[in-house]
Image: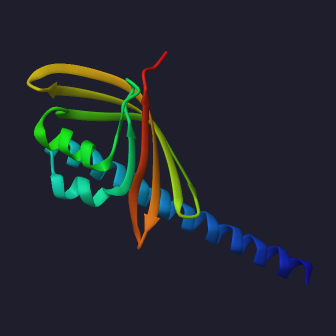
Amino acid sequence: MKRIIITTLLIICMMNITAQSKDEKAVGVSVEKLHKAMIDANKTELENLADDKLSYGHSSGHVDTKKEFVEKITSGRSDFVAIHTEDMSISVSGKTAIVRHVLRAKTNDNGKPGEVNLKVLLVWQKQHGSWKLLARQAVKPV
């Protein structure tokens, strides 16, 4: 009887790990889709990935709404030429995911070439089977 209980508990634990890993992978795919949409200035994809209540914090301290974030990207005011991430960690708790990574990017904001090196925190929320970006905060590394 003890062996059956232990086996059952192990199976339940493995099911939880598998489900979490599946969500972590889906969140990672959403992060990549976000970065591609930012590089491509794809308005439709940006709007689909971002929650209507998006709080998009910049390393300068300025915070954009969803509308402001999408407009800056699609107008070229904030133009990402290439985005590379390092040291990404994804933690899922229920319908919320926290992503941390280092973002290195080449930019061409308003036609002026530049480079950024930031630490980023993303908060994603699962809604109707899709992961939506709810919040983002960037800081300059110390």
What is the residue that sits farthest to the top in this orientation? 142
Picture residue at 21% right of the left edge, 49% below the top? 37
- Side (left or right) of 79 relative to 115: left
In this view, the residue in front, 60 or 45, is: 60
- When asked about the image quadrant of residue 10, the answer is bottom right
**In the displayed structure, would residue 99 be above or below residue 85?**
below
The answer to whether residue 119 of the structure is visible from this angle is: yes
What is the residue that sits farthest to the bottom in this orientation? 1
The answer to whether residue 29 of the structure is visible from this angle is: no
Quadrant of the image containing the N terminus: bottom right
Q: What x and y, as percent, mark residue 21?
A: 53, 60
What is the residue that sits farthest to the left in this orientation? 111
**In the displayed structure, would residue 10 be above or below residue 51?**
below
In this view, the residue in front, 44 or 55, is: 55
How is the model colour-coded? rainbow
- When asked about the image quadrant of residue 3, the answer is bottom right
Picture residue at 14% right of the left edge, 20% below the top? 113
In this view, the residue in front, 133 or 13, is: 133
Q: What x and y, as percent, mark residue 34?
A: 29, 49
Number of dots carrying numbers? 0
In this view, the residue in front, 8 or 115, is: 115
- Side (left or right) of 56 relative to 44: right
Picture residue at 20% right of the left edge, 33% below the top? 78
Q: What x and y, as percent, mark residue 52?
A: 34, 58
- Side (left or right) of 15 relative to 86: right
